[in-house]
Image: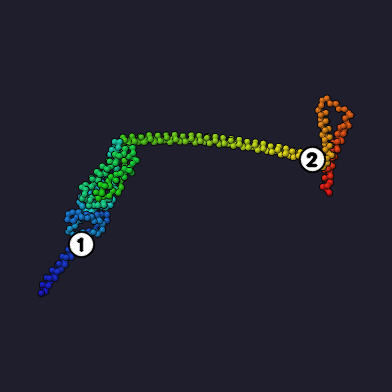
Amino acid sequence: MNSYDFENLLEGELVLFAVIALLILVLLFKGIKIVPEGRAKIVERLGRRNKTIFPGINIIIPFVDKVKVINERVTTKVKGQSVSLVDKGAIILAEQRMDPLSKLLLAKDNSQINVDPVVYFRVIEPARLVYDVQDFEEAFETLIETTLRQEVGKYDGDTIVTSRDTLGDSLKQGLLEAARTWGIEVRRVEIEDISFDAEVTQSLSDARQEELKRRAELVSKKAVAEQLTLEAEAVKKAAILKAEGDAEAKVILAQAEFNAQKLEADGLFLLKSREQEGIAQGYAAIAKALKENPDAIVALETLNAQAKIASSIGQSQNALIVPSETAGLFGAAASLVKGYEALKSPNAKKETNQKK
């Protein structure tokens, strides 16, 4: 092999290596896909949906798999304006909202009600959103209106105004099942406004004013009734307290009178007891004296007889006092003195013996 052939072989190998390196670079370029944060892309394999790649580095099979550039109209509505859910060929994963215009719906009592709903959702399966629904914005708005119409028809005009939270929860439950088939997740539903037409609104306002007036009158009457009740209770309590005071005063007065009578009776009893005790002690002393000096009995009997005679003479209207009886009186007096001395002598002897 000459030098020319060697150079040709070397050039062929270099070209081969270059082709292989270029092929590797192309494969790396085609097989490695980087998805930005908050986005998702769809991978098709031979023209059919294959998988969804999410933020970060993803590997696909070059020339077999292809990242789909989403050109379909995938939008939502915000204040009557369409907003795309696609950014540079990728589905936006951030939370979105469907905010259609208010809907004029019929309530249970055939009253017309304007309801303004807002639905917050997030895309969780971009492939379904792209392939399984033709016009997501129109389909979703129609589903909201249909479900809302069914829920509003369960309420009448008087109760729907106060059932905003309940209506939002019912609407969310009605949207969940259909939303899953479209690859979205309904996060929450809010009712921004519920209103009636001008005529009904005026009627409701008038009715509300009448209701407020009626309630004010009821509150006023209730206050007056409570005031009268309080006054009656006060009078009742005052009468009860007065009656209790009078009864207690009578009890105290009766107790005082009873105590006074008891004290007076106790005093009289004590006085009589002392008097009887004195009499008993006098009789005891006389009995003792007579026991010690029996001669005194005759003197006492004589004195008692003369006293009875003198009493009968003094009580008689026909009695005549004769001077000759004077000696008898002196004799009675002498008997008294003798009896006294007879009673005294034993006591004198007893005192003498006690001194000794």
* Residue drawn at (24%, 59%) of the image: 57
Q: Quadrant of the rendered structure where residue 303 is?
A: top right
Left or right of residue 332: residue 232? left
Q: Are marks 2 and 1 in contact (CB under 8 Å)?
A: no
Image: 66 above or below 354:
below
Q: Nearer the viewer, mark 2 or mark 1?
A: 2
Q: What's the residue type where badge 2 is placed? A: Ala
Front one among 227 and 320: 320
* Residue drawn at (42%, 34%) of the image: 217
- Asked if residue 83 can be seen in this view, the reply is no
Residue 344 at what x, y percent from top left? 83, 41
Considering every residue shown, the one lying at the far top of the view is: 318
* Residue drawn at (27%, 56%) of the image: 37
| Quadrant where the image shows the N terminus | bottom left
Q: Which residue is mark 1?
A: 28
Image: 223 above or below 137:
above
* Residue drawn at (21%, 49%) of the image: 132
Q: What's the residue type where badge 1 is placed? A: Leu
Q: Which residue is mark 2?
A: 287
Q: Quadrant of the rendered structure where residue 220 is?
A: top left
- Disc 1, SS: helix
Mark 2 surroundings: few (<14), some (14-19) or many (≥20) residues within 10 A = few
The image's colour scheme reads rainbow
Rounded to the nearest angstrom, the CA distance separating label 2 from label 1 is 157 Å
Residue 190 at what x, y percent from top left? 31, 45
Residue 226 at what x, y percent from top left? 47, 36
Considering every residue shown, the one lying at the far bottom of the view is: 2
- Asked if residue 12 can be seen in this view, the reply is yes
